[in-house]
């Protein structure tokens, strides 16, 4: 890949990273422990609150997973190993990397 493309991908990764970190900071409250007064609230309200909490926890888990993938891509960029397939070592297509810069496998190895 050319230096110009790598710079654009690095900027895209950093923008995604800062966006996910901002979402993570804002979403801390919705994953906190649900404490409801059972004498004043019905069973459905409690179930709804618990479901909301679980959805927030899953969203946080996915954000963390994406942050780890972005960090790995940034490390590969810094090491000069970005764009190489982890399995076969061939170059990952530019279209695939422009769609998902955290990709670690080429299209041939994804199916394996």
Image (cartoon, rainbow, N blue to C red):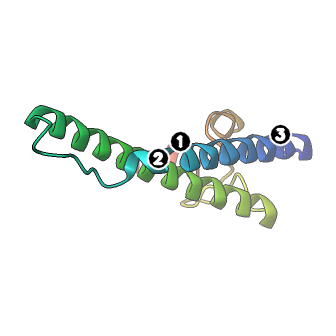
Q: Residues within 10 Å of mark 3 (few under 14, many from 20)?
A: few
In-image side of 48 versus 83 (left or right): left
- Are dots 1 and 2 in contact, CB under 8 Å? yes
Image coordinates of residue 76 in percent, x first then y, are 72, 61
Question: Separation of disc 1 and disc 2 at Cα?
Answer: 5 Å
Which of the 4 image quarters holds residue 90?
bottom right
> CB of mark 1 within 8 Å of CB of mark 3?
no
Q: Which residue is mark 3?
A: 8
**In what element is the residue under mark 3?**
helix
SS assignment at label 1: helix
Give above or below for 24 relative to 74. Answer: above
Toward the bottom, the furthest residue is: 79
Instruction: Give x and y (percent) for residue 105.
Output: 55, 51
Residue under the point 12% across and 45% down: 38
Q: Image point 64% across, 61% down: which residue?
A: 72
The residue located at (69%, 35%) in the rendering is 98
Q: Return the residue nearer the eye: 7 or 82.
A: 7
Checking the image for residue 110, the label placed there is 2
**Residue 52 image position (x, y, % from top left):** 30, 39
- Judge left or right: residue 4 versus residue 27: right
Sooner in the amino-acid sequence: mark 3 or mark 2: 3
How far apart are labels 1 and 3 at the CA level?
22 Å
In which quarter of the view is residue 19 placed?
top right
Foreground residue among 18 and 40:
40
Q: Secondary structure at mark 2?
A: helix
Q: Nearer the viewer, mark 3 or mark 2?
A: 3
Res 77 seen here: yes
67 or 33: nearer the eye? 33
User: Where does label 1 land, which residue?
Assistant: 107
Which callout, 1 or 3, points to the residue nearer the camera? 3
Say the numbered circle drawn on residue 91.
none
């Amino acid at each position: 890949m050319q230096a110009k493309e790598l710079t654009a991908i690095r900027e895209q990764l950093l923008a995604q990273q800062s966006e996910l970190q901002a979402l993570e900071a804002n979403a801390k409250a919705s994953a906190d422990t649900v404490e409801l007064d059972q004498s004043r609230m019905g069973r459905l309200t409690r179930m709804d609150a618990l479901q909301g909490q679980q959805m927030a926890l899953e969203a946080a888990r996915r954000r963390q997973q994406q942050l780890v993938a972005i960090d790995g891509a940034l490390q590969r960029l810094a090491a000069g190993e970005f764009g190489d397939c982890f399995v076969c070592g061939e170059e990952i297509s530019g279209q695939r990397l422009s769609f998902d810069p955290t990709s670690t496998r080429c299209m041939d190895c994804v199916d394996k």
